Image (spheres, rainbow, N blue to C red):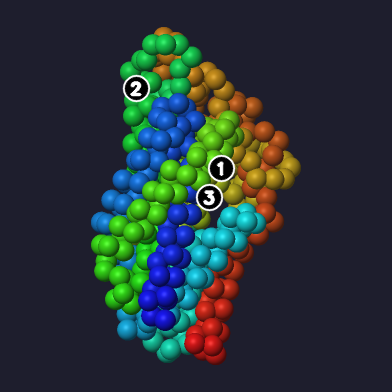
Amino acid sequence: MVEALFVLGLAVAVFVGFNIGGSSTGVAFGPAVGSDTISKTMAAGLMTVFALLGGATVGTEVIETMGGRIVPSSEFTLLASVTVLFFVGLALLVSNLFGVPASTSMTAVGAIAGLGVASGTIDWNVMGRIVSWWLVAPIVAFWLSAVVGRYLYPHLAARIVFESDTPGTSRRERVGQFLVVAIGCYMAFSAGASNVANAVAPLVGSGELALYPGVALAGAAIGVGAFTIARRTLDTVGNDLTELPILAALIVETVSATIISLLSLAGIPASLAVSATMCVVGLGWGRATRTTRLAEAAGAAVTGAAAGGSGGKGVSVSALNVDTEENPTSSGSGEARPVAKIGEEDPESVTTAADLFDPSATGRVVMLWILTPSISALASYLVFQYVL
């Protein structure tokens, strides 16, 4: 019975890692593959290496938090560990089948919290610190990206080229190619740091699996996912670059990966998907407010009106789409184009008639972020209190 449970636990851990590799590889290396900088096979290899590196370094802090700080490691019996992993795997399955943006980190923490409440061993100080950062991190992601979008984005777009229609490669193009790969590796590192714990922390906490063998297992599973199902997500992300330009995608990756890496270093399990989503919204809002002065932009943010006088509904990344002169695809003269000052930029070049976000749609997404760990915690509590 014990051996069967252990094998089941390993299988669920591999399933979790496999899905992480499948989804995270496209996010990390979609821009690099979409711009023909590297191949899908190279992207999968880099994802495997850097996810494993992130899990084996920064990620160990998250494993210790989830495997022994929220509740004592003594509570992670083999059966309890497998049950927690089951909730994580179920969240991934629902996410993949129905497109629900479930966070594996939040789901895992919720399941562990349910175990802690049922056994009366939860450390509320640790849990409070984690939840506090769940609230703060998306806000930080939004405003950092908004500042970049308002003040830095057009200058970067005028100086860096990611694609070329000519056989020659200018210095700006080489810089762009290097950045698109380097930031992809950084994103892979961050994904490993935050997500390896989701696959193996309960088993490591139970003592059934040692720390670094557990990291290796999760890293290998992520690699398998990267080399198999990630090929489709790489296609999807690569083909969607017309909606989210390469530069915008790299900024989103850099900001969200930095936030999650720092939180992982502090042992805080957090959602990379949540931070990345808020980065997209913040970058688009900041980009669109370049058509107005600061006082007008602040007023638009408070009232919920779109900057630049646009109206309508719906989530839009059109504010991130710049014309071909601002973000050239050929080397041309090799000189950066002058950037219009704030308040003088043509509204047509940065926004359309759609609002940057629909409050009702945003509310539904945020509600899902809240419901996912809440449902996981409640279900876990009921299972550990009345079944196990």
Measuring from the top left, give residue 82's x and y in whole percent: 44, 74
Looking at the image, is 342 positioned above or below residue 360? above
Counting residues from the start of the chain, the first of labels 1 and 2 encountered is 2
Looking at the image, is 20 positioned above or below residue 9? above
Q: Are marks 3 and 1 in contact (CB under 8 Å)?
A: no
Q: Depth-wise, is mark 2 or mark 3 nearer the camera?
A: 2
- Assign the N terminus to one quadrant of the image: bottom left
In this figure, which residue is indicated by the disc labeled 1?
285
The residue sitting at the top extreme is 333
Q: Is residue 266 left or right of residue 198?
A: left
Measuring from the top left, give residue 311's x and y in whole percent: 72, 41
Element carrying mark 3: helix
Q: How many marks?
A: 3
Disc 2 from disc 3: Cα separation: 28 Å
Q: Measuring 46% from the left and 85% from the top, which residue is drawn there?
A: 117
In this figure, which residue is indicated by the disc labeled 2?
174
Counting residues from the start of the chain, the first of labels 3 and 1 encountered is 3
In this figure, which residue is indicated by the disc labeled 3?
277
Q: Is residue 118 left or right of residue 378?
A: left
Counting residues from the start of the chain, the first of labels 2 and 3 encountered is 2
Label 1 sits on what residue type? Trp
